[in-house]
Image (cartoon, coloured by chain):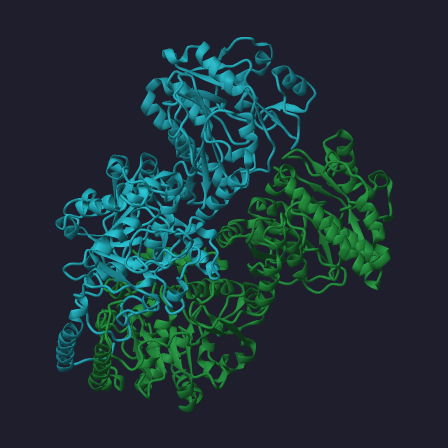
Chain colours: A cyan, B green
Amino acid sequence: MLPRGRPRALGAAALLLLLFLIGFFLFGGDLDYGRPRPRGAAALDGDLPAGYGGHNSSDCDPPRPRPRPPKCELLQVAIVCAGHNSSRDIITLVKSMLFYRKNPLHLHLVTDAVARNILETLFHTWMVPAVWVSFYNADELKPQVSWIPNKHYSGLYGLMKLVLPGVLPPDLVRVIVLDTDVTFASNIAELWALFAYFSDKQVIGLVENQSDWYFGNLWRNHRPWPALGRGFNTGVILLRLDRLRQAGWEQMWKMTATRELLTLPATSLADQDIFNAVIKEHPWLVQPLPCVWNVQLSDHTLAERCYSEASDLKVIHWNSPKKLRVKNKHVESFRNLYLTFLEYDGNLLRRELFGCPCPLPPGAKQLQRALARLDEEDACFEFRQQQLTVHRVHITFLPHKPPPSQPHDVTLVAQLSMDRLQMLEALCRHWPGPMSLALYLTDAEAQQFLRFVETSAVLSARQDVAYHVVYREGPFYPINQLRNVALAQALTPYVFLSDIDFLPAYSLYDYLRASIKQLELDGGRKAALVVPAFETLHYRFSFPTSKAELLALLDAGSLHTFRYHEWPRGHAPTDYAHWREAQEPYRVQWAADYEPYVVVPRDCPRYDSRFVGFGWNKVAHIMELDAQEYELLVLPEAFIIHLPHAPSLDISRFRSSPTYRDCLQALKDEFHQDLSRSYGAAALKYLTALQQPRGPV
Amino acid sequence: MLPRGRPRALGAAALLLLLFLIGFFLFGGDLDYGRPRPRGAAALDGDLPAGYGGHNSSDCDPPRPRPRPPKCELLQVAIVCAGHNSSRDIITLVKSMLFYRKNPLHLHLVTDAVARNILETLFHTWMVPAVWVSFYNADELKPQVSWIPNKHYSGLYGLMKLVLPGVLPPDLVRVIVLDTDVTFASNIAELWALFAYFSDKQVIGLVENQSDWYFGNLWRNHRPWPALGRGFNTGVILLRLDRLRQAGWEQMWKMTATRELLTLPATSLADQDIFNAVIKEHPWLVQPLPCVWNVQLSDHTLAERCYSEASDLKVIHWNSPKKLRVKNKHVESFRNLYLTFLEYDGNLLRRELFGCPCPLPPGAKQLQRALARLDEEDACFEFRQQQLTVHRVHITFLPHKPPPSQPHDVTLVAQLSMDRLQMLEALCRHWPGPMSLALYLTDAEAQQFLRFVETSAVLSARQDVAYHVVYREGPFYPINQLRNVALAQALTPYVFLSDIDFLPAYSLYDYLRASIKQLELDGGRKAALVVPAFETLHYRFSFPTSKAELLALLDAGSLHTFRYHEWPRGHAPTDYAHWREAQEPYRVQWAADYEPYVVVPRDCPRYDSRFVGFGWNKVAHIMELDAQEYELLVLPEAFIIHLPHAPSLDISRFRSSPTYRDCLQALKDEFHQDLSRSYGAAALKYLTALQQPRGPV
């Protein structure tokens, strides 16, 4: 803001030019150097050109050809990711990257089928502006690296970084390659800017390895792969793809690896061993990067030599197999940085870039338009906004094995939030079959949930329970959106649409499969099997092991039919009196407000997402099943029992707020209009039913 | 990491010196300039010296005398803060500042009594390394500014920035002054570095005002205070305190203000009007700062001219009275930044600075030592760690009026987490007196809680309920630490130590006060008044309005004495049979596992914080009351009723984990040893009781 006249501006421009020329003259040779010496501790102590990334660069640095990427340049990042656990890791990495970035980003993800499934859904629902994601099939790349014996915990996937020049699009010139276990503490554009220091021959930018591993003196008979001095770490790599392709990279690394494998049994550190062997042979290929761009927290790390000098760490690398539990006297501080992003609300990263053209991701534009059409003065504005909200979804958050394909198999479908976690163990004991559960959580709660499962022997033993995290956003519990996520992820031909507060009869899973078979539902019979619902008011009670026991408890008054006291209409059509005596499945008729728990084919109608919070969310679904002419068949031996809990916040709000009740009524009316549009005159009976007076809710 | 020989290093040094000299010669005049022109839009468009803070400064900038503070320099920050709401705001500001900072910080907080009380506790329990906090009494400063008529919403406190040079320690030379409604998006050291641009005469660094307010053409008869062009905004100020004191600042601004107030009725924008009037008169005092250091989001702001150019915003200023609800097409992005810190887990900011000496705050050293003494292999390690944890505490999170001092008044004391929020309204209806409630929440949950109270008519009507947020940390619910926080903040002579799942009889508050008076407890009688506890298993039931009604429900089986089925020992000594008939308070004897709800003087023993999670937390407290010879007097008309809820996670863990039960036993044993140490032979009876066999828990 200091005022400058034209002459001064001219003077300054001339000065800049002068500086540029002097700097180029003085440092030109450095940029071209091609004979790295064996590197010792000095390299970690900050032996960098002044301001060259290792320190903040605002002390006046000599000018350099291109110290920072132009504003708004698209940065390219490649990451190899496989399996459920790495898919969680990569999200923390991406969050840290997005938090500090100012540039548009293109992520190139080399994934197995599991990671692709998870990450495609995640990025699709995340809708971060100015982020593009491309997927590459890791399984197709396996033959290119599977011939290399490898002892590293990253397995085959670790080696895939070697084949990136051939895999990424031919017109991609530069890329930053990252391990999933790194965390950014700075703007990735500063890392990208280091490409400018590459000489014509340099093709790979790497940070020196921060341990003595490659010196081969860690233990007796320790025989590491060859490396230049301390070697380099491949957790963070800058690749000049164009030059690598030109230089015949593929042949180069394969020849080196083949030769070394004549005397060495296997790689110990996967791709890193091979990168180092190639560099040892062709040292001019490497551009060493400042240590702060890959602060390695392995056991016995020498990283402190790096960060004791630098006030600004740029990238932390959790490259010990112990990850966050690594021993290091500063680990608390590093862990805090990691936890920051682990628990960071990813929704907040949906912010636009300032001053860059910022095209909206697919879907976001329509969403924005739909939201803009809402009337903020409408008393039900929040309901409508919630129903339009696209929640970020992380499917199969934990390791999961899809159930083997069986024609009559049933998945239990339910949704929950943190306050129902304690139901999971009991549910697992009662339902030995596959489950698909949607969890409505914040990012921080998702981590609590992870620890909860890890410390539960019952839960961690189960691989057939799929947990899908739907990230919280907005004031209402989006119950039907959650149900739809869990339903969409069910992999068996049938689903049992339950709620988390119910425990099924121990025999229910087997009984349902037998019933589906017996009733020949797979023959195309369109039916919803009703599972009668009961409730107990006691926290602890002895769960009936048979229908006979259940009836005895019912007669003794320790059990009731579900919501018998508050809302009998919800289950009355199940006809409990008939059920007591029934030996065979029997058909019942739909009636207003009926909301039984049912077993249906997986391709049943979805839940109507306009119903959020408390009220009518299941009723509308059953209505739609009826409109689509599903038979309602009550199963004589099936039952579930509801356990007591405090009323949810949503039900409390419903009871105390007239607006809440009015809005629910408005949503019901609109639902009915839509039903009429879809089903014509047949939907008339629902309107009539809707207009009848009703009891208290 | 580029290798450089000695000759090159010498050359570089020479070059740096040369550049320094050239730069000084070229820009020296600018640093000295003293005649700001009237400032137009150009100033906001980034009319700054290249790299001068407005943009990232790594394009090679001409050298400047001191572009960045030396690593580890202590930075000084002053903020005026008064009342409950500003105390919440300032924490978000401080979190954003701490997140990006690399330097030690000294905060100078000018506070009223309310803010001081809150912030002292907060910083004391936050224990952030390398942060010092000093408090200054705002109330004492009122006479210095109260003569100025002021219409701004910040009230008297806004004006106090004017008197800082006299208030802050005389040896303090430079200070950054911030409004509580700013959010950092960058390292504050970069702002501090701008002091280096001050000429000898300049004393105040300010960003231009980003609205046309001071042009006086916003509406007919709009008469703003005089200002240089668009004027300056005082949300972010750099002050050279030494020079201000030398220049007779106090006299200067008072003269200007007095003179302007001859023709103007009052200040509209508090201190900002006066700063601008002084600057208009003495323009050489001001050093304009780049616009990115105070991006003003007032209504009709012109800030977009600033941030459309800059990719890096440094400080966001929510200077509209509408705060986050301000209309602005980019507000979502700014809001995301704000929400980032609003919801950020402040515990993560307890990280040490790298590469700076980083003295630990008071208490942190002992804590570190105590934690270091723990044995990580101990099966109960997590219990012991949790009990040592110092939780960050934000007392009186929401506006609160202390109850008028009355000799027999009673505060209801309880603790809760998010899953019990829905109890609050009912509790308020049942207890019309003062309450002190500890809430165990994450930072994000604290915001949900705030919204919950704001949208509840019942809760927002109550000013006598104090909510104390204790921030979550560790795996167990620290029940007794929470109780102690709530207990310590109770302001009446007596406290009713309750739990959140209980609703008191409607008459209980009045009845307790009458009983305290009748029993002459204020005469020094050492008694704990027992409030008999009952439970219902129904979510909805009609709360008894008298003892007679309660007894009828008990006889009908719709109510039970508390935990009658699961753990009758906990309340058996209350002697419910006697209570049915009692007309007068009666004394009962302590027995093993007795855990009644009691009314005691505020100075009663604290709860033992070793008991975390489920089990023995109240039992130990009652034991200590008995050891201190409190009479246990059961009140014949008092009762509370427990409402049903799902079992807590902790109780589920207790039931399923043998380690949990073993650790609880170990803690009990240690508690008893401590009891013996404190009370000698008298404590023997507790040991005997402890060793008796007991029923299932």
* Above or below B287: residue A225: above
Q: Is residue A351 left or right of residue A327?
A: left
Residue under the point 16% across and 76% down: A19
- Expressed as whole percent of the image width and height from the top left, the position of residue B142 reads 53, 78
> Can the viewer see residue B114?
yes
Dividing the picture into quarters, in which one does residue A315 lie?
bottom left
Nearer to me, B86 or B263: B86
Figure quadrant of the N terminus of chain A: bottom left
Residue at 63% from the left image edge and 39% from the top image edge: B657
Could you tell me residue A579's position as x and y percent?
Answer: 57, 13
Would residue B456 appear left or right of B14 to someone viewing this image? right
**Left or right of A103 in this view: B95:** right
Q: Quadrant of residue B281?
A: bottom left
**Residue B617 to residue A641: above or below:** below
Q: Looking at the image, how many numbered discs can be counted on the residues?
A: 0
Q: Is residue B94 above or below residue A89?
A: below
Q: Is residue A504 left or right of residue A99?
A: right
Nearer to the camera, A572 or A340: A340
Q: Residue, x 34% and y 38% (percent of image)? A: A115
Quadrant containing the C terminus of chain A in the rendered view: top right
Residue B520 visible here: no
| Furthest residue toward top | A583
- Image coordinates of residue A601 in percent, x first then y, are 40, 20
On the image, the x and y values in percent for residue A206 come to 27, 57
Q: Nearer the viewer, residue B581 or A119?
A: A119
Figure check: B280 above or below A435: below
Compare residues A238 and B145 and report the one nearer the observer: A238
